[in-house]
Image (tube, grey):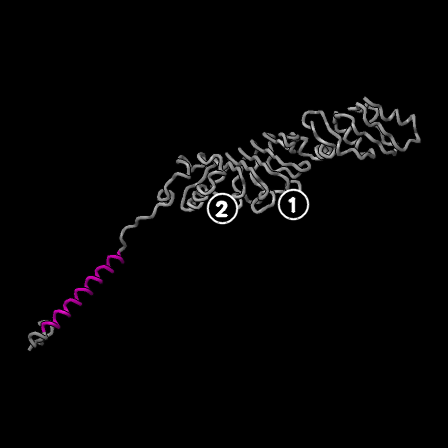
Amino acid sequence: MFNLTQFLRSFPLLKTLDVSKNRITAFTNDSYNFSEFNLAVNLSDNGPWMCEERLIRLIDRIKTQQKFVFKCSSPWNLEGMNWIQAKSVFDTDTCRKCDCFLANEQKAMAINCTATDLKSLPQHLPINTKIVNLTNNHIEFLTLPVTTDDWLHVRFLYLSNNSIASFQGFEGTKPLKNLVLLEIQENKLEQIPKHVLVQLSAISDLYLGKNPYVCNCNTITFQEWLHKHSKQIRDISSIKCHKSPPISGIPKSELCPQPTSPIEYLDILSGILAFLTFAILLKLIYDWFWQRRTGKLPQFFKINR
């Protein structure tokens, strides 16, 4: 532990302080009262740091060029973060309710808000957030904030087990176009419009099952899309209408049965008129041949005397 304030008070005229290549991992409590000094500090080749919020705020006030190589070792969610990333976590209100951390081997910024009683998408995310997990909440609408900059780097979005009934507010946006994975199982989707399906086509991994889809003639377009993109849809067997087989396997004749209406009265009348017309035509032809052969008018044309 290094008492920065006590050290600087011993050298009041100091303008530059180089404490690089030491083993400093934290400052004492007194150091956080540091506010009266104006100097450049070299903290390189120290740490990794125990990154509590007041340390990050202190580093923010110190004139140092080593903020980008600054690395945290604790707490667990800040492990591996540099100063910029750690400061972003502390500056983001969502991270006070959710876990914000570096995930996987790529050290991608992730936010996990599973089962935190969220009712809408988070307005703010830490810097360069790539993974957002919002499963098991009460989100109804995919309405993004007016400024979507925080969402532009998101590549993996988990929305399962919410109350989402449509893509309204999210369709056609850059964040949707940037996704490589979308999980939206167990929501309230009854249908997905054709223009939204076009946008989903660019996503590599899709999970759309266990929604209460409605099967009707419009479902044929959805079925054809499922067949075309079956390699991208990881749960195609669980995409069903109520108590039906998977939509991808339902015959089109069952999705959109053709109506079998009874013969209308006008159809019957048309048939009768056609028959009478044909019969009259035959009678005229017969009478014509009769007159030519006998020279007499047919019985029908005789004049009574």
In the picture shown, does residue 120 fall above or below 198? above
Residue found 77% across the figure and 33% down from its top:
67
Residue at disc 2, secondary structure: loop
Residue 45 is left or right of residue 188, and the answer is: right
Q: Position of residue 42 (x, y in %)?
A: 83, 31
Where is residue 64? Give x, y as percent: 81, 34
Q: Which residue is mark 1?
A: 146
Magenta span main SS: helix
Which residue occupies 56% across, 35% down? 159
> What residue would you read off at disc 2?
193
Instruction: Give the left or right position of residue 56, taking residue 235 as reference.
Output: right
| Residue type at numbered disc 1 | Val
Residue under the image location 47 percent in, 41 percent down = 229
Mark toward the start of the polypeptide (1 vs 2): 1
Q: Residue furthest right?
A: 13
Q: Quadrant of the image for the N terminus?
A: top right
Query: Which region shows up in magenta?
Result: 265-290
Q: Position of residue 134 (x, y in %)?
A: 59, 33
Spatial separation of the CA atoms under disc 1 and disc 2: 24 Å
At label 1, counting other C-alpha atoms closer than 10 Å, the crowd grade (few under 14, some 14-19, many 20 or more) is few
Q: Disc 1 vs disc 2: which is toward the camera?
A: 2
What percent of the width, then of the height, locates residue 218?
Answer: 43, 46
Decide whether residue 285 is among the magenta residues.
Answer: yes
